[in-house]
Amino acid sequence: MTAGSSTLVLLVFTAVYLGMALGRVPGLVLDRTGVALLGLIVLLASGALTLAEAGAATDLPTLALLFALMIVSAQFQGSGFYSLCAGAVTRAAASPTRLLALLVAVTGVLSALLTNDVVVFAMTPLVCAGLTARGLDPRPYLVALAGAANAGSAATLIGNPQNILIGQKGGLDFWTYALWAAPVAALSLAVVFVCVRLTWSKSLAQTVLPPPRQSAIAIDRFQIAKGVAGLLLLIVLFATDLPREIGALAVAGLLLLSRRMSSRDMIGSVDWHLLLLFVCLFGVTAAFAATGLAGEAIGWMAASGLSPDRLAVLAPATLALSNSIGNVPAVVLMLALLPQLGEGAMVALAVLSTLAGNLLLTGSMCNIIVAERAQASGARLGFADFARSGIPMTLVSMALACLFLWAAGVVRL
């Protein structure tokens, strides 16, 4: 790569990840996906990156797995399963504290088995409606919803987009990862509950109105059962030698065979913007890695005793990157620049990058989805509202995660 090309790549790389940090381009209606796409187009048009190189950098198995899991989630969404869960949570508990605990537990479990972004997208407006009907301030529950979705999703390699990517890139075993990560996720869910309960004590002291008469909800129990069967089959296939993406695509194909749920609607529920963001970031980060600048920086860090496979380096790096450019772009970046990470470091990266997303409202796409969906439902969740619980829950949960992973011998300090 020539000096001129390297300079252009560095400028585009910097501009793209600055756009990730800002979330938009000032003066333009351009979001993170648009910024990444424009960056990739500049590299292709200038010749700094060829279309073949961009294609080679794209991790198709990861995209296929993510697509298939979104189809599985669409099955649950279209069947009314999320409406059933949200209604059960907001109507069952007689006190705010019990309602909070139930919300954290249900959201955490769902997010471990289904993509957390899809869970909160479907659940947020339903939870808002149920809380408003019972005269409750929705803000602490919305913080808990996002926090639990992030914490719970850390338990498995299919809980969130960054874990899917790490699992595929690192070749991590599904069950071995869950053995290490599930206890951390369970501890983190408890931390979410305690932190929200303490930081929102006044709001959680409200009197709860009795649940109103429930209007008819469109629930298709056969489709729910079909979704559960598909999810169980998926988990069974993960225990075989069949590549995860192939097993997931097979299950998605079976779910698309339906006389009641339109394949067009299910495919339309896929987050195509997220898939495109992955494609663009794969290309941009591959071009930057080819300049050799990242390799030189990593070599300097290793020589200085700052090995990236140590918790002392990995934890602050994931915390800083996740809350500046977002945890999905942060993981894409770190995997491109640190291709030699071992299995233990990969496990730590998945857990820590997920928990780090709870620090600030902008730390993960999951948080942003909750805030945007809540606002559309008439409930405002501000930056400060989230931070008052997010900062303590993240620092405590990450400290516990580091302690557990080190004590278990997964990764060194």
Image (spheres, rainbow, N blue to C red):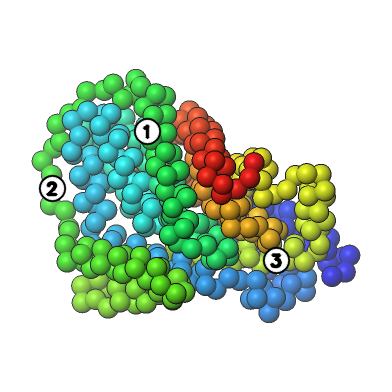
Q: Residue at x 81, y 54 (%)?
A: 299
Q: Quadrant of residue 321?
A: top right
Mark carried by residue 215: 2
Contact between labelled residues 2 and 1, with CB atoms less than 8 Å apart: no
Q: Residue at x 78, y 44 (%)?
A: 305
- Residue 255 screen position, x and y as percent: 29, 73
- Residue 393 screen position, x and y as percent: 47, 33
Q: Earlier in the sequence, mark 3 or mark 1?
A: 1
- Residue 345 screen position, x and y as percent: 61, 52
Horizontally, residue 213 falls left or right of residue 295, namely left
Quadrant containing the N terminus in the rendered view: bottom right
Amino acid type at image mark 2: Ser
- Viewer-side residue, 131 vs 154: 154
Label 1, label 2: how far apart the Cα atoms are: 30 Å
Please say if 361 is above or below 164. Answer: above
Say what secondary structure mark 2 lies in: loop
Q: Is residue 379 visible?
A: no
Circle 1 is placed at which residue position?
193
Q: Residue at x 26, y 63 (%)?
A: 228
Please say if 153 is above or below 197. Answer: below
